Image: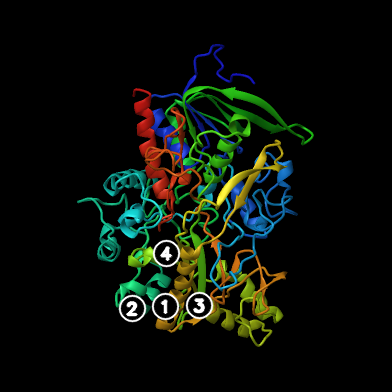
Amino acid sequence: MSNGNGNGSDTPQYDVVIVGAGVSGNLIAKQLGLAGKKVLILEAGPAVPDSREQYMENFYLALAKTPESPYPSLAGRIGPGVGTLPNPSEIPTPRATVLSIGAPPDVSHLIQSETAGVSGTTPDNQPEVRQLQFSSTYDRIGGGTAWHWLGSVPRLVPHDLTMKTTYGVFYDWPIEYSEMQTLWGLAESEIGVAASVTQQVPLQAAIGMVYPPGYEYPMGPIPSSVVDQTVSNGVSGMSVPGEGSEGGKEYSVFVTNTPAGRNSEPYQDRRVCAGNTNCIPICPIQAKWDPTVTLGDALNTGNVTVSYQSVAVNIAVDGNNVTQVDYLKWSYDDKGNLQSTPASVTGKIYVSACHAIENAKLLLLSNDQKGIANKSDQVGRNLMDHVLYLAWALAPSQVWGYRGPLATGGIESLRDGEFRTNRAAFRMEIGNEGWNFACGDPYTTTLDFVTGSNGSQLNSGPTRLGGTALVNTLNDRLTRQFRFGLLLEQAPQADNRVTIDQNNTDGLKIPRPHVDYGFDKYTLEGFRVAAETCSAIFQQMGAQEFTQPTVNPYPKDKYPDGKTMGPGDFNYEKKMYHMYGAGHIMGTHRMGTDPCTSVVDATQKSHDVQNLWIVGSGSFPTVATANPTLTIMALAFKSAEAIKAALGA
């Protein structure tokens, strides 16, 4: 392979080589560029256009408004939502998509076991570790998954970092909460977080949420929606009981404004949020921060270079040090044929920042597929997500959804408590988009009343309407819709893991990732309580619940009561549930102090390879209870400082 240095010598042209132009990679590149260090970013996907008009057009034309729908699946040659999904074996940067969940290898980038989707109980009716379809997705373009992130940036709570010490489960993080407070502040300034410390004060007593004295967010909060206000009024004075050893303890239920990674005032030369409800998959005016903002700052230092369409295939290690990164530079010729050229690049320090799943894949592929940085045997293991429970209802009066950012408030007061000894905690997101997530509304309900169908469950007659009757009915139903999305902790399990699949490759002949995934009782118990809590809140509010426990049925798989089971469906304690992936993919290269049980240290430097940092949400020892982007960026600041120190800056 060619050297890629461009200077005809063995002296590295770059101080640091980073694989991946996402949240971590771009932030680390910016910090190093500001320090005068020469940085190369290898980005697997195509360059991000200067204008997002093409992405918006893709979104508008896509039949399925999925998180991936605006973004090119074939280097911009074929947009999503047109015809069939591309075959991952034929394209250079295949990615997991919502439409490919549970699909066979000729459709899905992620290969999953044939038993995925099957769940049950042991003969004595005890829950077993279930094999389920992993239901989260990610992109492989500049900026990656964070193009279609929601923009919610709550901080972790103190006990999230001390689960082993406090509750006797899982692992402690190798970093103090006080240091994280400083790092979160840096991240909030980088993103431009809209929030109010004063509005978060009620959470101090409830879950221990604290801020450094005098701290203020970069800008004031995004206004609460009518949906938020309605839920807040509806749960006023409500509490839910603790369980088991907690005796008569009660946990207060109340709504707080959610810190948002979008502008409530002009910031970073970006506009103020205009209330578009399609934050997922794309903010049309870039009021919401995404990693391309930070990448632009990195490039403006004059010290950072990006090589697009460059897929890393090997991190070469000699002894305890990386010597080079080998990659394939791909393109399409005039006839549309995929072609690639091998190349290599050297640096003093290397950073793998290409997503929790892709990081694991790259580490396992390296060293002739013997793997690197894996003396602990933890690379790829402990794959986690925020398991998402979705519940929806009709409010007794209008709440006026379908406007504003997707989420502006939530119930955070149930994120911590003694119950975490036995079951998962969760944070409750209040959705502003009616039943769009739940059943594809407003389209589904509209078609129901026009055609006499009942996909939304709101036309049980069934009735066919037109004219004024149709308008009045839709105005009544659609304006009362709201939903909760609950992000549950998931236990880190060694058998939930990413490996490489030798039998299924992509268009560059690189083995694709294989995923094994399931739940244990800790997570399942959290799911049970999440469902019960939502139903209790709906009842308290006088709202009519319409939550359905199953979607996408497969006739071949049967529940005990004869109903069909689909991907993400499972039966626990004789009740059906459906889980969604939150897209918060974590684990696979856990950080810790012990090289025998973790992959990286507190700065995200490999325990085994001295000049290699492995960064991102894969480093999280636990999923905790907050959306991960803020903490990903906070840890990237810490990594950048460690790398600068290693370079003698």
Q: Which residue is mark 2?
A: 238
Q: Quick one: SS at disc 4?
A: strand
Q: What residue do we see at 36% from left, 28% from top?
A: 644
Q: Quick one: SS at disc 3?
A: strand
Q: Which residue is mark 3?
A: 393
- Image color mode: rainbow
Q: Where, by quadrant of the figure, is residue 338 drawn?
A: top right
In primary-sequence order, the first of circles 3 and 2 is: 2
Image spot of residue 134 (x, y percent): 59, 56
Disc 3 versus disc 1: nearer the observer: 1
* Real-space CA distance between mark 3 and mark 1, rounded to the nearest whole angstrom: 10 Å
Q: Which residue is mark 4?
A: 426
Q: Quick one: SS at disc 2?
A: loop
* Real-space CA distance between mark 3 and mark 2, rounded to the nearest whole angstrom: 18 Å
The three-letter code of the residue at mark 3 reads Ala
* Real-space CA distance between mark 4 and mark 3, rounded to the nearest whole angstrom: 19 Å
Front-lying residue, 273 or 614: 614
